[in-house]
Amino acid sequence: MAANPADTTANDIAELANKKPRTLWGDAWRRFKRHRLAMFGSIVMIVITVGVLIGPYVWTVSREDLDFTAIMSQPVAAHPFGTDDLGRDQFARALYGGRISLSVGFAAMVIAVSIGTLIGAISGYLGGYVDEVLTFITNLFLSLPTLPLLLLTVYLFRNEVTAKLGLEFGMFVIVVVMVGVLAWMQTARIVRAQFITLKQKEFVEAAICLGVKRSDIMFRHILPNAMSPIIVAATLEIGNAILSESTLSFLGIGFPPDTPTWGRLVTDGSQFLQTTAHLALIPAALIFITVLSINFMGDGLRDALDPRSRL
Amino acid sequence: MTQYIIRKILVAFPTLLIISVLIFAVLALAPGDPLAQFALNPAIPASTRNRIREQFGLDKPWYVRYYKWSTSMVQGEWGYSFSSKSPVINIVMQRIPQTLQVVGISYLIAILIAIPIGVISAVKQYTFFDQIATFLSFIGGSLPSFFTGLSFMLIFAIHFHWFPIVYSTTLKITDFVTLKQAINQMVLPVLVLVVQQTASLTRFMRSSMLDNLPLDYVRTARAKGLNDWTVITRHVVVNSIIPVITLVALGIPGIFAGAIITENLFRVNGLGQLLVTSIQNSDTPVVMALSFIFSILVVIFNMIADIMYGIFDPRVKYN
Amino acid sequence: MQIASSWKRSAALLAAALLLPLLVACGGAAPAAEPTKAAEPTAAAAEPTKAPEPTAAPAEPTATAEAAAPASDPKSLKILYWQAPTVLNPHVSSGTKDFDAATVILEPLAHYNEKDELVAYLAEEIPTIENGGVAKDGTSVTWKLKKGVKWSDGTDFTADDVIFTWKYASDPKTAATTSSNYTIIKDITAVDANTVKITWAAPTPNPYGSFVSFSGMILQKKQFENCIGEKALTDAACQAANLNPIGTNAYMLKEFKPGDTVTYVKSPTYRNADKTAFDTVEIKGGGDATTAGNAVCQTAEADYAWNLQVPKAALEPILAGGKCQPIAGGSFGVERIVINFSNPDAALGKKRSEPSQPHPFLTNPKVRQAINMAIDRKAIVENLYGPTGVADCNILVVPESVNSKNTTCERDIEGAKKLMDEAGFPEKDGARADKDGKPLALYFQTSINTLRQGEQAIIKSNLKELGIAVSLKAVDAGVFFSGDVGIDDTLNKMYVDMQMYTNGPDGTDSAAYLEGWTCAKMNSAENKWNGGNDGRYCNKDYDALFAKYKAEFDTAKRTALAIELNDFLIKDNAVIPLVNRRTPNAIINGLVGPTYNTFDSGLWNIDSWHK
């Protein structure tokens, strides 16, 4: 290219003029597309999400009906994931459980990222004593033993909460809130670091000079520029939350036994590992594939949104 | 430097105090009955339950109990377990060796596997080796440990009979046979943990290497005419390993927290298993002590990580 | 810089030093594992010959040699409990696991055997009215103790130890969990060093309320002397004693890791020490029932697995492993549907489920009978319980002598429909309504448990066939059984029309259990829903019959009356029994001794177990 600049420049300019202008998100998308594993992860996630959302309307077999004529069925056309020891259709249960597992992941992520962003933004932008106190709180939460505390709080508060909100929804609320509340610290750290860098930039100074409100500067001007690491953290958080929920369910401290979250299905199925291993392996594989896809997506997003890789 | 260390230590105390209040309050204010396990037993009359309640001081308000608990905790009196009616400290001490053995060994193995793989992966970025390593580390990081545990047990213990299902905690290593038994019974739980830990460490090591590889000092070293091996081992690895060491230090409290799932699955009587059974039995003093020990460890190792960073990374300011 | 370079060197060294053994270990492990794989076919070939016991025995060692644990050792016994023992003093323990672990060391005066008969342990013989041990008026009982029994520290067992155990367990400040067995005693006197006379606080028809079975184990006075009252739990020496009681049984404690493992060794001072079969006994706790079953029946790592409470579909393949036999029997209790005779309608507010509010249609005996006839017990047992339960028509099934033979409960859906028609609830489009046209609907609750949700589903479809709509509710077990007056979902409050759980008498005497259907025991706000009659069943004739039973001291007549009471409840459909539940234990082929047991520890006769 450098060999004969005079010849090519004119063509290049003409070509560029015809092209759409490159944008940050456009670039990111182009790079994301090149990340094969990330694309694979995204497609799988879309399939799973669409599947659990519309699946129960298409696959109308009840997840609760017992059928003692077909217990412990192998995967067949009538029961693609087989049936359990009470003859319940595992496919219908997995579809329903997927809704719960995915919504737990998503809702916990929203909570964690919201808290993290808020604390990180305030801490990073305001600095001074506020920053010190908030950083102290962040480190304090990082010091808490997460899984033990998660087990403990869910175990202690579930009766109270489920009595008020109903068994399934109450459990959902407590799991989501606890997973979220114990997972916001990484986001807060990332956001804080971003805010500290960004608040010294010219556009922020300009905004300050124009008399823009402080909250608007933080959330309208700086935050959009800090979005990319937050998105990456958020993606990974979904995967972590799904794993946390399945761990709780596996230890019997999560959702009630008749709520077929994926973790619960693995627990129930693990009793039959020797004879009908698919009862545990299919839901476990679903958890695994979902988390794997999310992690691939996160990796792709990290590469795609990294300003250093923007050429 | 000294000032920096003192500052870190001074911050640790209020952290611990607040954590202990938090944990205690959560436990004390929770609506569940701490004596629920007695309630399930119809043979125990309500009057006896009330007497047990008084004996454990559960009739007092929580801040009175917190004061009593924290003052005796400082003096090494950790109270006694509801379910085994014996001092918490004895029960905890009994569990520590197993946890250290199983979780510690797996952590060590994970580090030893992860660091070379991470280094090679980064140096040979986008090669077949890197892609396979990255792919495998993603898989390892996404596998729920109950899934790997159950599968290993099914395949290697129940089907092939290579390793036992039940972890014997009374086994004493006296000769070669018992040594072999000890190793045999540790293989499966250790394997489960290694899969998990290697995955995250490899990725961390790789990305840390990748951060360092394009830096100027690497170019300088190469320009000096050093060969690749020397550049990588003497310069890049040494610089990249600093954040990894911090991560490893931060992960050590996790060793003590035990591997809750793995220990339960294989009946390893570690701290993680103790925690789960204590939570299920509402054995509040044990839960309290364990949570607090974990917090202390996390705070201490956070401090150590910070200090190590200060020592190894000259860019850290000590103000 | 200095630091950095030395750090580099040591890091490299460390890496090299640590990698080396790893490589060696990996290389070493692989060939070691090979031969075991090769041995696999021989184990499989041995399988067919396994059916006849004796030939199977020689095959055993090759199979277990593959597994790393040396369980085949005829001198050691390995027992698996999926709940781990946490304390070995039975009087401050809180569960079966602890009582069972204590049974290996301590002994009561007598144990119950699998036939619910008493077998003398520390007693010379079982006192009866015939041998003069039991006072005819039910005021006292005199036990003769075995002579020459020694504690494992070498001292003699005497009447003082028995008296001490009573004082210890009955002191309110000790807060013994077994206290209800000892507060019924007014006084104990030592007639001589080997005879005790127990005087009851009130005349009782049951002379065996104290010092028998798992709650009757006797502590050594010397060891626990200073542990009466609060010190039982707070004093350091007493805490240590709770974890290491000195006993009279065939084994004594070697090592106890609370919440994990108990290891016992042969006690040299045991009266039949020469007949003790095992040098070491180990109870390992934790894990889950399924893998405990695997460890006995498939890998033969352990000899005995306690209470394999797993679904039928999981239990059958485990037992098919062929290396073990299940023992199940006795009764873990009767799974039953309790019918609410009061009205749980939420519109009643505070009067909800109070005895003063009769249920709109369940008070009709024909409706209750129809419900009973509509339920498919066979489906429940065959599909859900398998070997862990039998269909059952009686509410009182243990001891075997009081299990009534006068009742039947075959499913008869047509007969049930006819009864509903007669009762005035005609069917229209598959649903039934009362005379005001209000459709029949029930709320049916139980605790959360896969098995119970299965039962609920079967019963729901049974009653749908009958024309009654059922709404199911599943409550967390911790809430359902809690008795917490602040919560509405407890079984005591019973704010539903029907509920299901398992219960049974806690001893061979059924009085306290049968009292749970008397008018006086009806749960209500007044007694904080703690009466024990959660169905609010009240029938003067039953009360009269029960009064007669309670006053009867003659054993044979009492048995007849207990059966009569059971039949009364069943004929009136006061409660609907479903399944007699059993706890299956797995024992390895070749282990002799374990029996099932209803009223005592499964390890009650461990002194005579052998391989």
Image (tube, coloured by chain):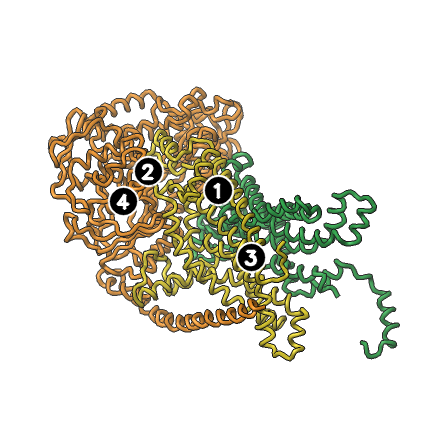
**Vertical position of residue A108 compared to residue C408: above or below:** below
Disc 1 residue type?
Answer: Tyr
| Spatial separation of the CA atoms under disc 1 and disc 4 | 30 Å
Residues at marks 2 and 3, CA–CA distance in whole angstroms: 44 Å
Where does the image place residue B3, in percent across and percent down from the top left? 58, 53
Three-letter amino acid code at the position of disc 2: Leu
Residue at mark 1 to residue at mark 2: CA–CA distance: 27 Å
Foreground residue, B64 or B119? B64
Chain B: colour as depicted: yellow
**What label sits on residue A155 in the rendered view?**
1
Pointers 3 and 4 within a single chain: no
Callout 2 secondary element: helix
Q: Amino acid at mark 3?
A: Ile
Q: Are marks 1 and 3 in contact (CB under 8 Å)?
A: no
Q: Mark 4 or 2 closer to N-term?
A: 4
**Chain orange in the figure, letter:** C
Q: Which chain is green?
A: A
* Nearest-to-viewer mark from 2 and 3: 3
What residue is shown with label 4? Answer: C102
Residue displayed at 36% across by 24% down: C521
Q: Chain ID for label 1? A: A
Between marks 1 and 3, how big is the CA–CA gap?
Answer: 36 Å
Subunit of label 3? B
Relative to B146, C544 lies left or right: left
**Image quarter for residue B72?**
top left
Q: Is residue C319 left or right of residue A253?
A: left
Q: Which label sits on residue B179?
A: none
Q: As shown in the figure, which amino acid type bears the numbered disc 4? A: Ala
In the picture, which quadrant includes the C terminus of chain C? bottom left
Q: Check disc 3 and report the residue beneath it.
A: B307
